[in-house]
Amino acid sequence: MVESNGRGRPRSESARTAVLHAVDDLLVEVGYAALTMKGIAERAGVGRQTVYRWWSNKAEVLYEASVLDAQHELAAPLSGDAREDVRAYLDALVTFLTRSHAGAAYRALLGEAQHDPDVALLLASRDVLEDSAAGVVDAVRTASGTTLSTQQATALLIGPPFFRILSGHDASDIDTGTLADRFMRVMGCP
Amino acid sequence: MVESNGRGRPRSESARTAVLHAVDDLLVEVGYAALTMKGIAERAGVGRQTVYRWWSNKAEVLYEASVLDAQHELAAPLSGDAREDVRAYLDALVTFLTRSHAGAAYRALLGEAQHDPDVALLLASRDVLEDSAAGVVDAVRTASGTTLSTQQATALLIGPPFFRILSGHDASDIDTGTLADRFMRVMGCP
Amino acid sequence: MVESNGRGRPRSESARTAVLHAVDDLLVEVGYAALTMKGIAERAGVGRQTVYRWWSNKAEVLYEASVLDAQHELAAPLSGDAREDVRAYLDALVTFLTRSHAGAAYRALLGEAQHDPDVALLLASRDVLEDSAAGVVDAVRTASGTTLSTQQATALLIGPPFFRILSGHDASDIDTGTLADRFMRVMGCP
Amino acid sequence: MVESNGRGRPRSESARTAVLHAVDDLLVEVGYAALTMKGIAERAGVGRQTVYRWWSNKAEVLYEASVLDAQHELAAPLSGDAREDVRAYLDALVTFLTRSHAGAAYRALLGEAQHDPDVALLLASRDVLEDSAAGVVDAVRTASGTTLSTQQATALLIGPPFFRILSGHDASDIDTGTLADRFMRVMGCP
DNA sequence: CCCTAATCGAGACGGTACGTCCAGTCTTGCA
DNA sequence: TGCAAGACTGGACGTACCGTCTCGATTAGGG
């Protein structure tokens, strides 16, 4: 994204939203591999240069279109029962990664990040998953008085299902109840 | 890969190894994103058709060329001291994912797998990482008498560093000592 | 145009003729200005690279497609009556430049040559107009015993109507009879 | 060019001259083929719309910027010696077409005119070359008492070198002395 | 010792996305 | 209303790679 200095025709908001919606739609319809800048522009009814002017590749468009929405899907209210909150979060996480559109976008981008440094930077600049877990993780940290940092604890929480799913295994054999129990134990909760 | 029925000119072993070496070299030189079937064939001094005849896409070539070698890099002898073996394995794992060529190939393929079902199947058919951990994990499982399956325990071991690295964070802030301790604790070891 | 060394798939003759016909058709239908390499390829049902492989720009295709045919249109049999042969040639020339398709192609290329050195070279390498006049001009030269070179005499013959037409004036006010008479006089014929 | 009705802000003379100078400069620097309306506007420090408001294409700008100047370059004083005047005019003509900037602009426009009717009209509306020859041609016509019209005689004078040069041949083999002699002869001068 | 069959290298084929450029139009705020 | 700035849709540019194809040449059996 780029800032304007007030001179000249201002950026068209309608073009912006048309592009973001086009990307959302196309991701579902044709998948990330078949997603092209050309296709996005045509679907949005927008000149190709207009897409390139504001986003430098399909990863950036997709990030703005989908990934930022992920927060809503991963937000879980804290009930006070730490173990239940952990489990609810894990359920939301697994659903996000395996069933939601935003999750598909996230996985696609994370995949791209493995061989495109620009995308890697984009994702690392604001780690949606890590952020989403901050609430539950800190609640547990406070309750347990652990010496682990939020970052370390978050990895312990998210890592196991993340590994199973990204490695391509069936998500149905993930038992979030057990995972929640083990997380409480590793955090030193009674 | 395809089998022949014995009639006609046999498959050229030299062409096969030339292709595999070309892929290895090119991955290092230009990276996965710039790796193309055309480039592989030219580098190997081989006809394009010859590559397509035996592998259907660059993921398959790369898998045969690099990923299978990963086992050697991840193999760690068991010393008997479970906690130390876990830690040694984690060190090998982090090094593999962040520094080795085979690890780069693995991450690239895992990335591709997020938006290409064929590659996902290829990787899931033999999970190199999971296999590599079987030794240490089972040693700990036996020692602790846990109720966790090997699969579950492996996810608990590999997941945390895997998540940190794949998410694009700096690997240097991964403390394998702490991770090993926490793994022992979550497995119920004294 | 490029030569092959016998290795690999040979050049497709059908693709070649399809391109040449497409150019011929398109020149008539949309005119030279709207003639594009993309349009040619699509009209010919041919890959874009295939066009670029054998011709480096639309001028080259058009030259091969049309201009070389010009010789037929400008060929006039010599009757023996020099003055009549000159007049017949001038009629053919004016018709060629103002009414024929090949003539339209020639004028378009000559126009392009004014600001593209490559095209200028292409045209100068074989001057279709100059060649076409050689017969009549030499007949007159022999009859008159002039000291003018063929080249000089040709310019005197072709130049006047060429200038009128290229300058965009109406061709109908060109009197080839008078032009023929004057050419005979300037050549020193009785 | 367009007229204003006196209301509102008057046309900026500085913008006009900036555009004309920009075109002159760019023609020399990048050539006609690479001359663009966008480039002209940017070089002139002028809005793109401002260029389109007063000229409808690059040919019009170039015509106003350069071609009208051609008259000065082609003007030759009449000495009274008709044959010498003809020769001097031919020298000026050849120099104009092959060496001068205005001549390059003229050739470029004449080239464009071969495939753009608008440009053809623009050039035909005032034939710079024909006009420039009027003086010498009429002097010779008067002296010779020929029956040829000015238009016809002009074509006989300009045509031969015009053809040689526009066809892309080297200008150095044009012998203006011989051409002048032959012109005198064809006009019936003693 | 040919014959059949499959492989090999090379390289052209039709397609299509890439990212850039310009055309010609439009929408700002300022003069 | 003109103007500079600059974003807009649209489309051609020339390049690259895709996966397929068609050559001639090579290398094995099996008759």
Image (cartoon, coloured by chain):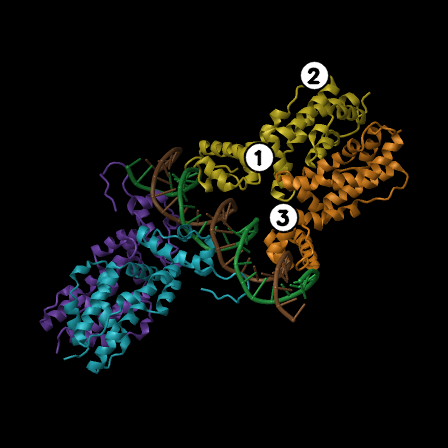
Chain colours: A yellow, B orange, C cyan, D purple, E brown, F green
| Viewer-nearest residue: A65 or C28 | C28
Which of pointers 1 and 3 indicates the residue nearer the eye? 3
Q: CA distance from mark 2 to mark 3?
A: 51 Å
**Residue A51 placement, left or right of B74:** left
Mark 1 lies on a secondary structure that is helix
Residue A139 vertical position relative to residue B75 in the rendered view, above or below: above
- Residue pointed to by mark 2: A79
Q: CA distance from mark 1 to mark 2?
A: 31 Å
**Residue A166 placement, left or right of A68:** right
In the picture, residue D72 is in which quadrant?
A: bottom left
Q: Whole-percent x and y of residue E12?
A: 50, 59
| Residue that protrudes farthest toward the bottom in the picture | C145
- Residue pointed to by mark 1: A63
Mark 3 lies on a secondary structure that is loop
Q: Residues within 10 Å of mark 1 (few under 14, many from 20)?
A: many
**Residue, x 70% and y 37% (percent of image)?**
A167
Chain letter, disc 1 residue: A
Which of pointers 2 and 3 indicates the residue nearer the eye? 3
Chain letter, disc 2 residue: A
Residue D177 seen from this side: no
- Residue pointed to by mark 3: B56
Q: Quadrant of the N terminus of chain C?
A: bottom left
Residue D23 vertical position relative to residue C132 in the rendered view, above or below: above
| Residue that protrudes farthest toward the right in the picture | B80
Q: Whole-percent x and y of residue A70?
A: 61, 28
Q: Are marks 1 and 3 on the same chain?
A: no
| Residue that protrudes farthest toward the top in the picture | A80
For the image, the number of numbered tags is 3
Q: Residues within 10 Å of mark 2 (few under 14, many from 20)?
A: few
